[in-house]
Structure formats: structure tokens, C-alpha cells
Image (cartoon, helix red, strand yellow):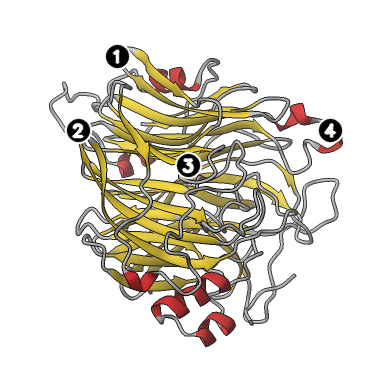
Amino acid sequence: MSRRRIAGGWSRSAHRFLLGPLAGLLVAACAESSAPVGCDGDCAPPSLVDTFDTGALEHRVVPREGWGGLKVRLSGDRAFVLEATRDGQLQSRRRLVASSTAGGVLWALDEAAGEHFSDFTLHPSGELTLAVERTQAERGGYDLLRLSSEGQVLARAPLPFPETLPSGELGGDLPERPFRMKSREWHALRDGWVRTEARGEDVVAAFLSLVDEPSTRPGGSGSLVTGVMALRWTEAGYTEVWARVVDGRHRVEPGAWAYDEFRWREAPARPLLAVDPVDGRVIVGRTWNALRCLSSSERFQTPTRVQCQTGEDVTSYMDTDYQPLAYTTFSPEGAREETRSFVPASVAEFVVFDLAAKGGEVAVAGAVVAQDAEGVIAYYPPSPGSTERMTPYDGYVAVLGRVSGVARFERTVDGGGRADHFSALRWTDDGLLAVGASGWDRWHGGKSISRGAGPLVALVSLDGAEARVRSVPLDGSARHFHLLGVDARAGEVVAVGLSDAPLTHSGDGGRTAEMTFGGLVVDLR
């Protein structure tokens, strides 16, 4: 297999530090009216473009050991946040928190022993679907919880073992019931193997699972299979509408030496999921490695084996730096449509951390390292006191034609001259909203990150012509301050992430207390 690779914006801001639970900070962030001055509540709030150009920026931190934000969704005057914490003994927990501008923290749902909160989605009614893994279950451990906006558990049941898989997707190297509905080991910041997206009051789930077979070694590197399922919600719970195999038997085994402060090592495994709000089509994205590609070739006759073995849009099942994206589209009724792969031209490194879909297009966000036609990378100088060259990551946003897989535009974002990337993406009427990390250093000859990150907040116009960046006055230096989730409502952006988080070697020598982190909230309006 061959491929090309080698071994500003506005800064006006007001800020303050507030200590306390992350959920409470979200309440403080939203306490004031978002109506423009002079409106008397009768005129429209500003667009996100106006918000980025003239809005006030605040950031708040929770000290470690505290709750950091992984994902946020806004509904009316409420904010729902999936949070994580890790203590000095490296024990981690997650919770889902709801806050209100009027009444403070409304409710919090904590993981029980042996549970892992994987993902959640918000429905138009304000109800939520939460994906939970029961980590001690040998099979059938993926559950869906339906929660009211008040935090009441309306239903809980296992994500069904698929019963509507077409016969052509089974047999061969897959057992009759291929999904074990179990993942490998998990940790505080891991991207879950079950992803959820609302489709009205119904839900779509994409999931990666160990293959359900006796030869799978407990806790080991067994074969994997990826699936997607549409479920209908009724008062009695969720019922399967259709289910499909996305990728048949394959493996994903990123090197243990890969750094994971920004979840680079998680990206090769976990699925990405979007539902187009215009036509209801379901898009499942993932890193396109050779084993996934070959499985698709054998089971669905596309792409060809030659493309899987020689194409530059395919990577090794062990790689973490160079991660071409593939996505497969399913009709609202579950018919498998196009599978397209994508990697930008002339890049040495590439990774997609999030995707969104709308109106027949797919938007992606992540990071790239560019190289010229000769494979030369323009490394930047190291921090003072070091002689090593540093890898020039830029935040990356692109919009692809869903059917063609061709980029309508690509946009890189440099938040300040050092390394940058985007972790989360939201498609809004005013542009593509992306957040992540900026200003960190990674040695070009290894995986170690030697300088911490600050938060990166950007709005890329829907034609790609403009990228507005708001600077957050946090100096990462010896620790990381970065964003992992974002959402917007009229005239306001709320992003959540981690503060005072560890670098690559913070925990060396048994210093496990240095592996803790706190929480970060950025509010722009």
C-alpha cells in the first residue's frame, strides 16, 4: 500500500474565573437576556456572525479534580452536558447534567458502578436518549435510556440485537448474529462506541462491537464489526425499524505509544454519525483503514480490492496520524447508498473528529499537516529551551458533496502560529461552528506533546470564504485547556471542555495525581 506521507481574528473579550460545579457555571453563563440592547424583547437576536464580531467572550474554569465537559446541547433555557472526571488513582466517572437559566441545576444523572455513558442526543420535545454500556456484560451490554427534560427515566432497554439485517450482509466471515454489543476497555475521555442522533422523536444509533464468537479473547484484540440501526420511540420504549452492517469483520489496533490528550488514539475506532435534517438520510463515518475497506469490497463489492490495497485514501489499521475518512449513506428506509472516502490533497497527517450533514452535503472538522509536492513539511520553531522542530497542525473544516465525495470547499484555521485542531462541529444557519485546541507543540519525531493548548473557537462561513476566530485568553504552557463540545442558540455560543489537563508525560514516574483535570466553559454572546 502506498501513500504520500513522511516518518486571527477578533480578540475583544471579557473574562472571569468562577469556581464550582461545571453545571452551575453553565447557569451563570446564561443568566442574562440574549436580546439586543434597545430591542425591548421585540426584535430578533443577533446572528452568530454578529456574535463573533461584537459579542462578549467569557470563560470559566473548574479546578481539578473536577468535572470536565465532553458534549453540550442547548434547548430553550436549558443546557445538557455530558461530563467526566478522573481522580488521582485514575478512576473515572461520567454524568449527564441539566441546568436552567431560571433555576440553577435541575438534575444530574450519574453512572452506576459498571456503567459507561457513551453518548446522548436531544429530541425536539426536549427529551433525551442516552447511550450506556454495561461494562461487565459479556454480550448485549449496550443500553438506551429515554429521559424526560426533567430527568425522569421514561424507559431503559438494551439496544436490540439486530433482527432486520439483510441476508446478504451476513454469512461468510460473520456469524448469524454478528454483534456482541460489547466494546473494549474504556477510560475517562474515550469516545463511546455507541453514537446516537435524533430523528425527530425517534433515534438512530451507530455502534462498533466485538464480533460475537467464541474465539474472541476476553479483553483482547478480537475482530470488530460496525452497524447502524434506526429505532422508533413509543411510550413502551424503542423498537427496531431497520438495521444494517456498515463494515464487516475488521480490526483497529492503534499503537500504544500514540498520544491521547486530544483523543487521537480514539479516532481510528469510534464511529461518527449524522442525520440530514432535510431528507432524513443517515451518514456513518469512520477512519478508512485497509481492513475495513477490504471488508466492504468483499461484502458490498465497493471499492475494489486494488483500491483498498494501493489507494492513498486508505490507511493502516494501526495508524493514528494519517486517517482518511469514509462515510456510508443510508436512506431513511435503510437502503445502503454510496460509500465515499476522502483525504485532502498534499497532507502528511489528517484526522476527522466530527461530522455533520445538511441538504445533501457532509461537513467534517479535524486537523491537517500540509506538505508540498516533494513531501516537505514547514515545521515551526520549538518553544524556548528546545532544539526540536514542531509539527504544524492546522484546524481543518471542509464541506463535501454527499453523493460525489468531492469537497465544495476546504478551510484551514490557524489559531496563533502553533498546532491547532477542531474536536467538535455544529452546522448552523450562519456557518460551521467548530471548537478545539490551539497553541500546542508536538515534536515531529515522536508522539509527545511538550506545550499545552488553549481553547479554539471558530465560525467558518457556509461558502468557506471567511473564518472568524475568537481568542480565549488562556495560556496552556504546562497544561492543556481545550474544548470538546459546542452548541449554539440565538445570539449565543456555549462550548465545554477541560482545564488544567495533563500533557503526554505528566503522569510519568507514578505521578497519577497529575493525570487529573478540571472543567472549562466558554460563553460567547
Name the residue type under label 3.
Gly
- Residue closest to the eye, 384 or 420: 420
Viewer-side label of 1, 2: 2
CA gap between label 1 and label 2 equals 29 Å
Give the labeled residue for mark 2: 235
Q: Mark 3 points at which residue?
A: 141
Q: Distance between the residues labelled 4 and 1?
A: 45 Å
Looking at the image, residue 326 sits to the left or right of residue 144; the answer is right
Secondary structure category for the residue under label 2: loop
The residue most toward the top is: 103
> Mark 4 packing: few (<14 Cα in 10 Å), some, or many (20+)?
few
Label 1 to label 3: alpha-carbon separation: 37 Å
Residue of label 1: 102
- Locate residue 24 relative to residue 439 in the image: left or right: left
Of the pair 132 and 150, the residue shown nearer to us: 132
Q: What residue type is labelled 1?
A: Ala
Q: Which of marks 1 and 2 is nearer the N terminus?
A: 1
Residue annotated with mark 4: 510
Q: Which mark is residue 422?
A: none
Nearer the observer, 326 or 404? 326
Alpha-carbon span between mark 4 and mark 2: 50 Å
Q: Residue at image x 71%, y 32%?
A: 515
